Image (cartoon, helix red, strand yellow):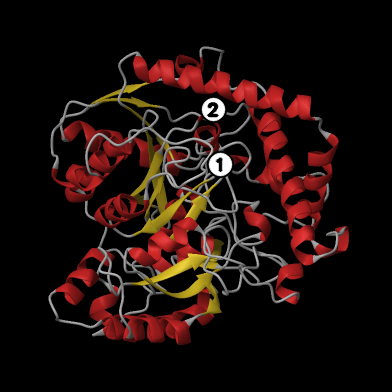
Amino acid sequence: MSDDLARMDATAQAELVSSGQASPAELVDAAIERAEQVNPEINAVIHDLSETARAEAAGELPDGPFKGVPFLLKDLGAANAGQPLHLGMNVLKEANFHAPMDTTLAQRFRAAGLVTIGKTNTPELGIVATTEPKAYGATKNPWDTSRSAGGSSGGSGAAVAAGIVPMAHANDGGGSIRIPACNNGLVGLKPTRQRISEGPLVGDVMSGVTVELCVSRSVRDTARLLEAVHGAAPGDPYVAPAPLRPYTDELDDESGGLRIGLLDSSPIEGVEVEASCVEAADKAAKLAESLGHSVERISIGDILMIGDGAPGLEDSFLTRWAAGQAATLTQLGMLLGRAITEDDVEKLTWDLAVIGHERTGARYLLDVGLHQALSRMVAVWFESGYDLLLTPTMAEVAPKLGEIDTSLPDLAAYHRCLPLGAFTALFNLTGQPGINVPLHWTDDGVPVGTQFAAPLGREDLLIRIAAQLEKAAPWADRTPPVYAAAG
């Protein structure tokens, strides 16, 4: 039965429970067995919560849409009170730090009926686009264990791709949902800014750079989970526009007629796009056209109206990213009762925190203002008549493990991540939603994703196009060499 379950998405597993064909305990036990089978090879799950998961599954679960379905939380962001929370950091690992309270999103995951069996690996503070923290070691890509599973939700991405669970929690501050989804052949939706509450301890992160949701194997799982957990909580600093109708209504909408812009050159000057990534975007464009949509090739200048690249995008993003690390280390020091020092963290983390403290509040506001200007340009482009933007998800195929080294000086690891986040980070700054869809693989079997971006608040369009593409070119039967099911 475990082999059959490994190939089912979360919706199908929930239907087994609701129909009485399987119990939550059976689903959870099978997922734990699958984790024991493959996790030693890929190092995706770093905190084993099987004991509490079995107890939950044997008790009364909320009657949500995913009642009894096994789930994994990323060890960064959403958290349950009393469970380990280490953020990829040795200092928290050594302190045996545990979450002081439930986050709003963790409560909503639980209300949806999900049963958390463990927590997944993440780079220190989620900073880089690969999951190779000094605290817990590298997570390996199930499609090619010499390659990165992506970051910062690489542990979640690898676990879902390897069949441990059908979907897992993820969050995204520069591409950290979409990049692991791209590298692992999964669906990864970054919602609109503040679509999902980050409370109660956090209002927003870096003025709205980060968002939360999941990586999954099917569009319908992503739509159903978004439907279950979206919405503001009391005290949130601002809220996303309300959806026009239930997200799940988009799954069966096969209407064509969307106008799509195709951008396959990098929005960051000096970043080249690998041929496989261009090929993936072109393939998605042709498939979209076959479904009745129109696709027009554009340049970044058409969107931003400022030439062939976004001036200062890399350095202005650095302002917000570095400020975030500086603030986080200060907050963690308050929780631990002592200041975090240079010896407590990886070199890149400390170097970013130093920059975060050095750059002034005025500089921060100037760069946020620049990003707000970019937001207006992107919004105006959509208002000019475009429904969606289609891009490669990344400018290169999943890199080899070890290429992004956070121990190097001069922010080398940060700069090495630019090709990975060249197409994704823009929408963290501007707030629009984006989704990775797995439509292409290289000749040697490595997934290469495609990103669609939509106007602010229009996740419905992303779910609709992704569901259409999934039906036209299904990916569910594609499984990696490291996979927790026989045959």
Query: In this rendering, does residue 167 appear at all?
Result: no
Q: Residue at x 65, y 71 (%)?
A: 137
Disc nearer the start of the sequence (1/2)? 2
Query: In this rendering, does residue 241 appear at all?
Result: yes
Secondary element at tag 2: loop
Q: Residue at x 40, y 86 (%)?
A: 55
Q: Is residue 388 above or below residue 57?
A: above
Q: Please state which amino acid type lies under the numbered disc 2.
A: Pro
Q: Label for residue 421?
A: 1
Q: From the viewer's perspective, is 466 left or right of 79? A: left
Q: Quadrant of the N terminus?
A: bottom left
Most foreground residue, 127 or 71: 71
- Position in image of residue 371 (x %, y %): 59, 25
Verify CB contact (< 8 Å) between mark 1 and mark 2. Answer: no
- Position in image of residue 485 (x %, y %): 32, 80
Q: Quadrant of the C terminus?
A: bottom left
Most foreground residue, 329 or 10: 329
Quarter location, residue 152: bottom right
User: Which residue in the structure is indicated by mark 2?
Assistant: 267
